[in-house]
Amino acid sequence: MTDVRVRFAPSPTGDLHIGGVRTALFNWLFAKNKKGRFILRIEDTDEIRSTETSVKVILNAMKWLKLDWDEGPDIENLRYSPYYQMERKEKGIYQKYADELVAKKFAYYCYCTLEELDDMRKKAYANKIPSKYDGRCRNLTLKQREQKRNEGKIPVIRFKMPDTGIIVLNDIIRGEVKFNNFLLDDFIVIKANGIPTYNFACVVDDYLMEITHVLRGDDHISNTPKQIHIYNALNWNVPKFAHLAMILGSDGARLSKRHGHMSVLEYRKEGYLQEALINYLALLGWSTETSQQVFTIEDMKQKFSIERCGTSPSIFDSAKLLWLNGEKIRSKNPEQIYELFIDWLNYTGNDKLIECWDTKLLKKAIFLERDKIRLLKDIPSLVDFFFTKDVDYKEDAVQTVFLSDKLKSIAKFVLIESSIRLSNHQDFSAISLEKYARDLAIEKNVNTSQVFHPMRVAISGRKQGPSLFHMMEIMGKEEVVRRINVAINKFFK
């Protein structure tokens, strides 16, 4: 069997979005599963919209996602390079095969103006027939072509589509799909400026790069019969095609910006983990026999199969992605979560946020709160109270616990007693601190909550947070007592 070679070929006309990443991922997983090669090709023939900035964004997104390519920009194989279509165009690669199509009478020069083409569309609409090129330049004589050139008309090259018959696509996912040639257009392969169109350039590149399988979104199905015709005209082997079902938003409409983030790097800014996004996207259109939901990268490489990709659209569920991200974070140890957090801070330019924070305390605080972390961006607001000298007392906490007529006197007693007793408390472990608080509740014949809540609010300024006694343990006796005294002076003097 020929070694598997697949490609991801984005157009650098904007950011890399979710749909594109899913396509890249499935190609990457397929290559890894088959011990093949994954090629990254930049299809930059849209000379107006393609930008170098977009290229950099795409490459950065691919690197963050760890979808490493075996060949492509920065990793060139001279047998197949270059990996930018405009560089390939400059080498005359596309023109060579376009000329071959003309010589074999599978293509022809077309001199029609934009006005003529617009008139064709209007007539087709008026006659309620499919709008397509009417072939008026198909059989121009040499003399007629020379006359048009003398008039200053620069031709395009069109592929001569058969008028009868069908073309058959044997899709790995969808099975046999048939297309009526009569309904297909004499499409352009080379524009008047010499730049190849998508349908022609990708066929030439896939052939020369020896691509064995083309895995892409089902929005390309309509392009496939045109591409198969080019393969056949040039007597080239047709690769195997697999068209992935589209991704829809929760409302059933095609995924767009209004459904949430579309740019992959926006997810990075929000604090999603690369592995969570990859895991979730793998579930959009593919499943295992056991309906497994949480995967490691190695799991996916070993189990991925194109044959288990479905034909029905997938629904992008932001809530499920968020849940999965939390699961991935909770699977890490404190050191790993800390490193991921630091990487996120550096990426977002928020590294100064923690420049005065004690690293050891931060790691302990992160571990204490890890069950609440869904996004890396959640961490600062969950743990920042550990690192402040001036506690930010939340109004609802103060009103409920310190200023309530029912609880104020008990809160005052608890804090004053705790200031004295905890100063002399030898064992400042969570277990010992919890025993102290429960004993105090028994001594004063009050509910444990009437002891716990004043202590929590005094120390953190909040009604909710991590385990109170573990929080006190890692904060340390000196800081805990200091904060209790601050609260006493602020609210009970």
Image (tube, grey):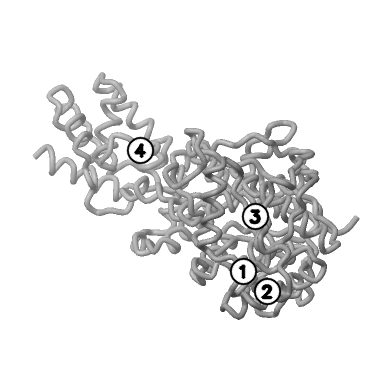
Q: Amino acid at mark 2?
A: Arg
Kind of element beneath mark 2: helix
Q: Earlier in the sequence, mark 1 or mark 3?
A: 1
Which quadrant holds the C terminus?
top left
Residue 403 percent location from the top left of the image: 14, 31
The answer for how far apart the CA atoms under marks 1 and 4 are is 73 Å
Q: Earlier in the sequence, mark 2 or mark 1?
A: 1
Residue 215 percent location from the top left of the image: 71, 51
Name the mark on residue 111.
1
Q: Earlier in the sequence, mark 4 or mark 3?
A: 3
Q: Earlier in the sequence, mark 2 or mark 3?
A: 3
The answer for how far apart the CA atoms under marks 1 and 3 are is 13 Å
Nearer to us in this view, 28 or 167: 167
Name the mark on residue 465.
4
Name the mark on residue 145.
2
Q: Residue at x 62, y 65 (%)?
A: 43
Kind of element beneath mark 3: loop
Q: Amino acid at mark 1?
A: Tyr
Q: Amino acid at mark 3?
A: Asp
